[in-house]
Amino acid sequence: MTQKISTHLCWEFLFYFYGYMKPIVAIVGRPNVGKSTLFNLLTRSKDALVDNIPGVTRDRHYGEGTWDETDFIVVDTGGLLGADDFALPIQSQVNQVIEEADVVLFLMDAKMGVSPFDHEILADLRTIDKPVFFAVNKVDNEQQETLIADFYSLGLSRIYPISSAHRYGVSDLLDDLLRTFPQAAGPTGAAEKAEMIRLAVVGRPNVGKSSLINRILGQERLLVSDVPGTTRDAIDTVCRVDSSSYLMIDTAGIRRKGRVSRKLEKFSVMRALKSLSRCDVALIVIDAHEGITDQDITIAGYAFDRGCGCIFLLNKWDIISKDSRTEKKYMQELRLKAKFLSFAPALTVSALTGQRVMKIFKNADDVYSQYCRRIGTGRLNRIIESAVALNVPALHRGRRIKFYYATQAKTKPPTFVCFTNYPKAVHFSYHRYLVNRLREETGLDKTPIRLYMRQREGRKRKGFRSKRKK
């Protein structure tokens, strides 16, 4: 069956993630003028990485801001006209953002003064037919406002002196920005507000994570390069497959601890690990051409520890020399090295050719369905009772271990609690046996399961009399 994907970048993101149309403010400028700092200020977050190294932001980054009871979307962009290998792709990214935005905010640097790059960016902005605001950043107080005098040589009628780090002058800028916003559309219906499945794409650097998302979206939403570590932020993008919506989270490559040296890269790895905590299903991308490495299994362990559903994707399958047993050998090796994720589906895919890429969503739907499933208490207790009767646990210090009752504490992932007289005496092998029985009887064969043993609280003893009867 042919699947239809809709991926109009910003509008899809607003429509399905935020619930209704909101004005879009795009922050543009040359590298290291403080765009990400301003983004974090407007969104009241720390979503954009900030460092004094130019060119930290490469992909565009969306966030939600509010001012004077008005909601809007802020877009952080990569620095224009940088001197590295990513200059042209970033230029293309920024052009797309400007096309989508309702208002453009051009940010300059008071400490560095007017740059030739500022002239070139300004020449491009004068060709667009939408409001453009000009702000000079790093003006920390009223006495420093003289620093903006040189910027009037650009032929601008109004320049806003601001400090992203100290909030100076930002309120005046936002007051005027709000007056140019188009009227926002009303709330969407309940169907559009339905919860999306959140898919985090994780893996080592340069295994094809961004290429995979670009293949899914059908356009260059994320930067792709053969330089490891291109993605630094965790980027959220919404896509639709048939009638279902998915939030795709691209993450930075997770290296071995010994190879993470620079502060910026450490923050990127931390952000990638944090993305695992907020996703429903982790798509663990492995470079099949390089083989299954120890770091791949370590990353899978991170996903397992955070309790998210998992799908293994053996990428670059198109360049593998294959015979009739190749896929089976890969799967056997994967299952042997990642025994703790024996329940996770695995696919061989190619982000370059699109081979089996659309099967990811069918598997994600199956995993998510089980991930959210709730088992009735009566049925759950019958399963545990039957399992115990079939295989009685070993004695603990000559006493029988009793299982009194079980209940499901929560979903995402399905989490069960068994109340017993000796919870610490339940051997890990018997614990594993009960989990396997739960999988067999409930059909939860593609999701992680948490099973905890708890001490049953005894009956309250009657209090002693305070005084003897005379």
Image (cartoon, helix red, strand yellow):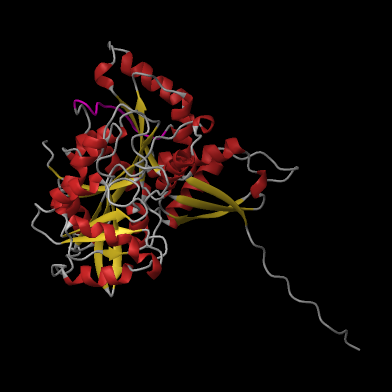
* In the image, residue 199 above or below residue 42: above
Q: In this view, does 462 lie to the left or right of 225?
A: right
Q: Position of residue 191 (x, y in %)?
A: 18, 60
Q: Can residue 40 be seen in this view?
A: yes
Q: Nearer the viewer, residue 75 or 148?
A: 148
Q: Position of residue 284 (x, y in %)?
A: 37, 34
Q: Which of 445 and 113 is in front in this view?
A: 113
* In the image, residue 468 above or below residue 12: below
The C terminus lies in which quarter of the figure? bottom right
Name the residue furthest right: 470
Q: Is residue 176 left or right of residue 377?
A: left
The N terminus lies in which quarter of the figure? top left
Q: Nearer the viewer, residue 123 or 202?
A: 123
* Magenta segment, prevailing SS (helix, strand or loop): loop
* Membership of 245 in magenta stretch: no
* In the image, residue 348 above or below residue 435: above
Q: Position of residue 239 (x, y in %)?
A: 20, 46
Q: Nearer the viewer, residue 445 or 440?
A: 445
Q: Is residue 87 left or right of residue 228?
A: left
Residue at 22 percent of width and 60 percent of height: 152
Which picture quadrant has residue 360? top left
Q: Give the range drawn in magenta.
A: 343-353
Residue at 9 percent of width and 52 percent of height: 127
Q: Where is residue 77 in the image (x, y as percent from the top left)?
A: 27, 48
Name the residue furthest bottom: 470
Callout count: 0
